[in-house]
Image (spheres, grey):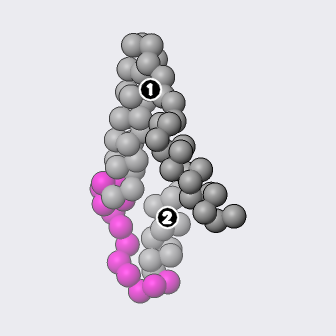
């Protein structure tokens, strides 16, 4: 369905249609790889009992910028 829509848009722009392989390689696989890396990272963090907090330095820098703007 998505490929058909994209190819219709490309046709209105006088551009050539994408094949299934081109569509998969350009749009689907990069997002699957990114999602897979994110899920692996979340799993590792959870299994090793780590958690993420904001950096105190980062928060203090943001507060400094906020105080300058007021």
Q: Is residue 24 above or below residue 56?
A: below
What residue did someone put label 1 on? 42
Q: Crowding near pointer 1: few (<14 within 10 Å), some, many (20+)?
A: few
Q: What residue do we see at 41% from left, 35% from top?
A: 38
Residue 29 drawn at (x, y percent): 34, 47
Q: What residue do we see at 38% from left, 42% from top?
A: 34
| Residues shaded magenta | 12-25
Q: Nearer the viewer, residue 1 or 44?
A: 44
Residue 69 drawn at (x, y percent): 64, 65
Q: Earlier in the sequence, mark 1 or mark 2?
A: 2
Is 30 in the magenta?
A: no
Q: Crowding near pointer 2: few (<14 within 10 Å), some, many (20+)?
A: few
Image depth: mark 1 or mark 2 in front: 1
Q: What residue do we see at 50% from left, 75% from top?
A: 9
Q: Is residue 12 above or below residue 36?
A: below
Residue 4 drawn at (x, y percent): 49, 64
Q: Is residue 65 above or below residue 31?
A: below
Instruction: Give the spatial CA distance, label 1 vs label 2.
Output: 34 Å
- Secondary-structure class at tag 2: helix
Q: Is residue 20 visible?
A: no
Farthest-out residue, bottom: 14
What residue did someone put label 2 on? 4
The image shows a total of numbered marks equal to 2
- Secondary-structure class at tag 1: helix
Q: What residue do we see at 45% from left, 13% from top?
A: 49
């Amino acid at each position: 369905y998505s490929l058909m829509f994209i190819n219709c848009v490309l046709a209105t722009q006088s551009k050539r249609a994408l094949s299934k392989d081109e569509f998969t390689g350009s749009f689907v696989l990069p997002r699957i790889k990114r999602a897979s890396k994110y899920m692996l990272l979340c799993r590792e963090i959870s299994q090793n009992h780590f958690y993420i907090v904001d950096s105190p330095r980062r928060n203090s820098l943001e507060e400094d910028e906020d105080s300058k703007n007021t």
